[in-house]
Amino acid sequence: MATQIETRDDGGARVLSISGEIDMDSSPQVRDEIQQNLKGVSSLKVRLAEVEYIDSSGIAVLIQGMKDCGKADVPFALLDPSDSVRSVIELAMLQQVFTIEETGD
């Protein structure tokens, strides 16, 4: 399934909603979207509710995005990770590293 990224503003926060897969093929696209959207926002949130699959390259892109946001002094959070994303985050023991928010949507 092709990866799709939708961008919207929610108050001062920029929200990137990703659907599909985050893998070796789509990781560069996700990285570029994160870098392009961290300028001029009060926070950046990556919504992962519709992500069916994520591999280590996808996790690496999220970690890099968190670091880039830290350098830019922009808070970074993961929103509503799907069960498959959550299991990879927990397997890698990164649930304490990322800020994870549940919106209930």
Image: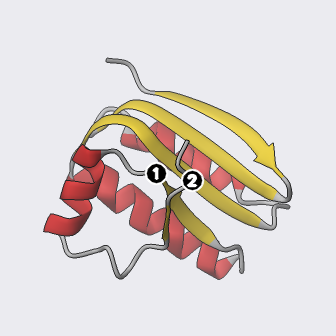
Residue name at image x 26 percent, y 63 percent:
89
Position above or below: 84 against 102:
above
**Element at label 1:** loop
Position of 67 relative to 44 (above/below): below
Residue at the extreme top: 1
Gap between marks 2 and 1, in whole Å?
6 Å
Which residue shows up at 67% across the image and 60% down it? Answer: 44
Residue at which label 2 appears = 103
Callout 2 amino acid? Thr
In which quadrant of the rendered image does the N terminus lie? top left
The answer to whether mark 2 and mark 1 are in CB contact below 8 A is yes
Q: Residue 24 location in percent, x, y?
A: 27, 39
Q: Is residue 92 left or right of residue 11?
A: left
Residue located at (85% from left, 55% from top): 11
Residue sitting at x 55%, y 41%: 105
Q: Is residue 100 above or below residue 46?
A: below
Disc 1 target residue: 80
Q: Nearer the viewer, residue 6 or 38?
A: 6
Tell which of 47 and 64 is nearer to you: 47
The part of the image, by quadrant, that contains residue 52 is top left
Q: Position of residue 17 (x, y in %)?
A: 56, 39
Residue placed furthest toward the front:
104
Precedes in sequence: disc 2 or disc 1: 1
Q: Residues within 10 Å of mark 2 (few under 14, many from 20)?
A: few
Under circle 2, the secondary element is loop
Left or right of 50 in this view: 77: right
Local packing at callout 1 (Cα closer than 10 Å; few below 14, some 14-19, many 20+) is many
Dot in front, 2 or 1: 2
Residue 68 disc label: none
Horizontal and vertical percent for residue 79?
Answer: 51, 55
Q: Which three-letter amino acid code belongs to the residue tagged 1?
A: Asp
